[in-house]
Every structure is written in structure tokens, then in C-alpha cells.
Amino acid sequence: MMKNPYVFIVGCPRSGTTLFRHIVDAHPKITISPEAQWIPKWFERRKGLTPDGMVMPKVVPLLLEHSKFALLDIGRGELETLVGNGQPVSYASFVTGIFDLYGKARGKALVGNKTPDYARRMHTLHALWPDARFIHLIRDGRDVALSLMAWSRVSQKTPGTFPTWKDDPVSTAALWWELNVRRGREAGRALGPELYREICYESLVTRPAEVCRAVCSFLGLPYDEAMLRFHESRTSLRPITAGLRDWRTQMPAEDVEQFEAAAGALLDELVYSRAFSHPRPDAVKHSTQVRNLLAKVPSSVRPYGLA
């Protein structure tokens, strides 16, 4: 029996996960809910839960106060029904109920979620829902860096909040990209091919039908061309467009070299061609200094796993 959450779409922020969410959501049999960083975080911190992970009644007002939860359009009465009549309810069952309600309102039985940051919390999600699938969208980190540096909200978002961002956004973006991609791939190797699939952003935008067919096969769904017409239902959406970011023409050479000095090894692993096969020693030394500075940030602020 298929159970929600059915699939999680993850990836380093600015890797095209929002585009991919719209594509998958256009399939007639599955809907993808908006970002919900609170799901694994609340379980890890036992927020509104007992020490053994059971839901307490106070989780209802906590969720209703959460700005992101409002995007799900689920009311107090529905949440209180999920909490039950005094019988213990596990956090996993409670969140599954939330996903079921989200899907019911949209006429779809299968419900997934797109939250890029989940690339670093896949172990927690898998422990809660052992059958859930993960699709990891990976994009050339140099284009991710370009997108991050042009993002109007980056000062309020990771990695724009890191102490190294102001003086060296390129190296900081490179290390942030490396962290997210490596954490996702490490977790994916443990999950195996039945539950984990990597999708290359560049392939998605240049061969969308081929990639969507592969995605549907992974999800156990029939391919539907509606996925490629996702933009027709909303005037605010643009169709799949390649080349929106191109580090080859839009990134200064010195920035390219600095990025590759910081994260060149991962570019090689992912078979992205480098512009600088051997960055200058000064660039390598500088990227090491930035990595060390980030490792000294207090653990409550430091990007998880970057040490």
C-alpha cells in the first residue's frame, strides 16, 4: 500500500527544486506540498512531542502559529482530529495524516514534499518513513553560486547568514553547495536505488521528457505529458528554460577559479568540466581558510556537517 509522504525532493538551495516541484505536481496522480523545514527539525528537537516521539496536544497551536504551515491550508479542526481522542499518536502517523489531508484537498492520493534542506536530514526522514523515496536534484555548483549571489533574499537565508559570506560569497557558496550535495549523496548510498534517485538539473532542462519518464518510472507512475505543461495552469510560471544561469559567460574568471579551488573535487566526481584544472596555490589556501573559519562558528549557527 502506498503511504504518504511518498517522495521528498531535495537538493542544495537554488538548484532548481522549485521548478522540479511544479513539474512533478502537474502529474495527475501526485501533488507536491510546499517547503516544510519544521517536519524533521521538530522531531529531532521533540518540539510538541514526548521524549519517545508521540504527539502532544500542544503541537496543534504550535503548528497553527508557524508561517510555513499556513501554506498547507489545513485548519485547527482537522489537526485536532489527527491528534486523536487521547490515544497515543506517533509523530510519523500525525504528519502522514497532514499529507493525506493536503492530497485529499487536491484530489490526489499521493503526496510528496519539496524542501531543499532535507538533503541534510534524509536519515531522520527515512527513520520516520522507511518506504519514502528521495529525488536529489543536482546542479552545477558554479551556476548555484551565481543564483545565490543574485538572490534578493540571500541575506536572510543560508549561506548568506554565514560570517564569511560578505567578504567571500563565492567560496562560501562553493562550500555550502559541496556540503548539501555530499550529505545527500551519502544518505542516498545508504538508501539504495529503490528509494533514492539523482537527477541532473542540466539534463532536466535540456531533455525534460526523457528525465520525466525516468522520474515516473522511479515513482512507479505512468508518464504523463502534463508534467511538461505545468506552466500552462499559472501565468506566473515560465516553461522549462535552459541557460538561465551560465557560469561560463556570467561568472568572472577569478570567481570560477576560487569556486573550483573550494569545491573542484566534487565537480570532478559529478563529471562537471573545470575551467581550472589546477587552481593557483593562493586560491586553494584561501578556500581552506574560509572552510576553517566556518568550522569555528558555534554549532548552533554553523552549517551542519561543515567542519
Image: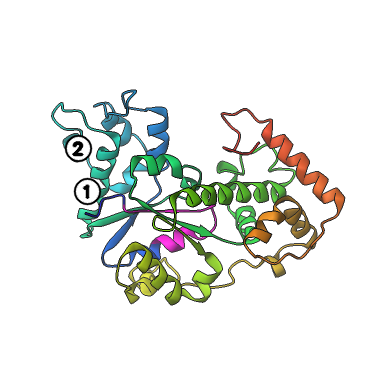
Q: Nearer the viewer, residue 120 or 232?
A: 120
Label 2 vs 1, first from the N-terminus: 2
Amino acid at the residue labelled 1: Leu
| Residue 179, horizontal then vertical, whole percent | 60, 46
Q: Is residue 13 magenta?
A: yes
User: Which stretch appears magenta?
Assistant: 6-21
Quarter in which the N terminus is drawn: bottom left
Q: Nearer the viewer, residue 30 or 189?
A: 189
Is label 2 in a helix, a strand or a loop?
Answer: helix
Q: Nearer the viewer, residue 288 or 234?
A: 288
| Residue 153, horizontal then vertical, whole percent | 55, 48
| Residue 305, horizontal then vertical, whole percent | 59, 38
Identify the residue at image location x=68%, y=60%: 268
Neighbour tally class for label 2: few under 14, some 14-19, many 20 plus, Cα within 10 Å: some
Q: Is residue 200 magenta?
A: no
User: Compared with residue 97, is residue 269 higher up or lower down, i.e. above or below?
Assistant: below
Asked whether the viewer can see residue 163, the reply is: yes
**Residue contact at pointers 2 and 1, CB within 8 angstroms:** yes
Identify the residue at image location x=58%, y=49%: 182
Tell me the residue that label 1 is attached to: 101
Tell me the residue that label 2 is attached to: 82
